[in-house]
């Protein structure tokens, strides 16, 4: 498998590193606009191959998309991240132009590619990539819910005082502080509802901490996070590479599912060799449905700022 990662910054490099360490890809190509940056990151990462024990090759290029030709998967992380106090939506002005140009360049050289969009505001950037490339909807995946769900599990395990591996849980909805819908009533610890371990106040705290998970890190780091985002992307790429048909919440172009159409928003999907193999419609309570609908309104409002 050949994977291209556009943007060799914090998230792109972390994602390339996890993909390399997990050792399922033959070739990883990093692309950046900053002269020599992707080449440097690729060389640094390649010098970890004997230490970390992987056989994937990693190369870098300053904007030469011919080197990405024949990619099976491309991850778009190019664009600016938020600074403390900013919302993801505020990044649209700069990132929309970058995501449009990058996705068009990618499909010129890799017509069969599956694109994973990471750049923020992610749901709107995923919609933009879908519209500007015209790719079938199974081949455009937005990464947000896989990360938000990992942050939800971290918060749940911390509140309960148990290992994260005991926890199952999912966050659907838009990838924004107000749009995320952590499904706390469906989350479990070893198949027992987490609501049996946490008071109503604790549950509310976990939900809130999950929704502002990115902002909390941005405040601490001065820029947005990269390890968990990179790891989350690598798991989506691995599910495609291994055709594992695992379920992740991802931003997908909806066509009537959950009563929503013509927008990309986080819903549970099955990921396999064709990208989004299926959108899974889980039973939502009235309260969950209401939150998803409100979240969709927020995403639509941001989509309205796109010049399509
Ligand atoms: P960064 O600033 O470290 O890296 C971005 C890289 O993109 C830079 O190296 C820059 O030179 C490059 N770039 C800019 N324009 C380009 C172009 N036209 N072609 C190729 N490369 C270009 O930023 P970071 O922290 O890696 O974040 C990247 C994006 O991912 C941001 O928009 C951020 O908000 C988003 N993000 C999304 C997450 C999610 O869950 N969806 C999680 C974390 C970050």
Image: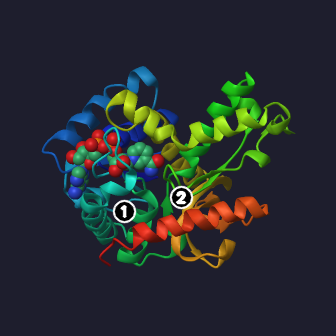
Q: Residue furthest left?
A: 35
Q: Is residue 41 above or below residue 266?
A: above
* Closer to us: 41 or 118: 118
Q: Earlier in the sequence, mark 2 or mark 1?
A: 1
Residue 265 in percent (x, y) is at: 55, 64
Query: Who is closer to the viewer here, 165 or 42?
Result: 165
Left or right of 200, for residue 71: left
Query: In what element is the residue under mark 2?
Result: loop
User: Which of the 4 quarters of the picture holds residue 50?
Assistant: top left
Q: CA distance from mark 2 to mark 1?
A: 31 Å
Q: Which residue is mark 2?
A: 174
For the C terminus, the quadrant is bottom left
Q: Nearer the viewer, residue 235 or 298?
A: 298
Query: Is disc 2's CB within 8 Å of ligand 1?
Result: no
Examine the rendering and report whether any part of residue 292 can be seen: yes
Q: Quadrant of residue 267?
A: bottom right
Counting from the top left corner in percent of width and height, residue 231 is at: 50, 38
Which residue is denoted by mark 1 in the rendering? Answer: 70
Foreground: disc 2 or disc 1: 2
Residue 293 percent coordinates (x, y)? 62, 68
- Model colouring: rainbow
Residue 273, quarter of picture: bottom right
Q: Which residue appears at 29% of the width and 71% of the height? A: 108
For the residue pair 144 and 158, the one nearer the viewer reads as: 158
In this picture, residue 133 sits left or right of residue 233 = left
Q: Note whether residue 274 is visible.
A: no
Check if mark 2's residue and mark 1's residue have beta carbons within 8 Å.
Answer: no
Residue 161's x, y, as percent? 73, 21
Residue located farthest toward the front when viewing the structure as drawn: 201
Q: Residue at x 66, y 74 (%)?
A: 257
């Amino acid at each position: 498998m050949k994977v291209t990662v556009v943007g060799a910054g914090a998230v792109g490099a972390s994602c390339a590193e996890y993909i390399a360490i997990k050792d399922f890809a033959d070739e990883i190509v990093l692309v950046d606009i900053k002269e020599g940056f992707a080449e440097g990151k690729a060389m640094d990462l390649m010098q970890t191959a004997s230490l970390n024990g992987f056989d994937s090759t990693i190369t870098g290029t300053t904007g030469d998309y011919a080197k990405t030709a024949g990619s099976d998967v491309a991850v778009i992380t190019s664009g600016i991240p938020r600074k403390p106090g900013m919302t993801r939506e505020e990044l649209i002005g700069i990132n929309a132009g970058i995501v449009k140009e990058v996705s068009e360049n990618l499909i010129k050289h890799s017509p069969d590619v599956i694109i994973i969009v990471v750049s923020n505001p992610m749901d709107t950037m995923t919609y933009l990539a879908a519209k500007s490339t015209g790719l079938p909807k199974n081949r455009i995946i937005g990464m947000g819910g896989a990360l938000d769900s990992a942050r939800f599990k971290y918060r749940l395990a911390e509140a309960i005082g148990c290992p994260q591996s005991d926890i199952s849980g999912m966050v659907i909805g838009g990838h924004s502080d107000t749009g995320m819908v952590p499904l706390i009533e469906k989350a479990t610890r070893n198949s027992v509802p987490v609501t049996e371990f946490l008071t109503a106040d604790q549950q509310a705290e976990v939900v809130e901490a999950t929704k502002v998970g990115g902002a909390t890190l941005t405040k601490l780091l001065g820029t947005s996070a990269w390890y968990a985002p990179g790891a989350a992307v690598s798991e989506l790429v691995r599910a495609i590479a291994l055709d594992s048909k695992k379920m992740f919440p991802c931003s997908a172009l909806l066509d009537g599912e959950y009563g929503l159409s013509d927008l990309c928003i986080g819903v549970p999907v099955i990921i396999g060799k064709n990208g989004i193999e299926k959108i899974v419609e889980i039973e939502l309570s009235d309260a969950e449905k209401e939150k998803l609908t409100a979240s969709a309104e927020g995403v639509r409002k941001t989509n309205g700022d796109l010049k399509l």
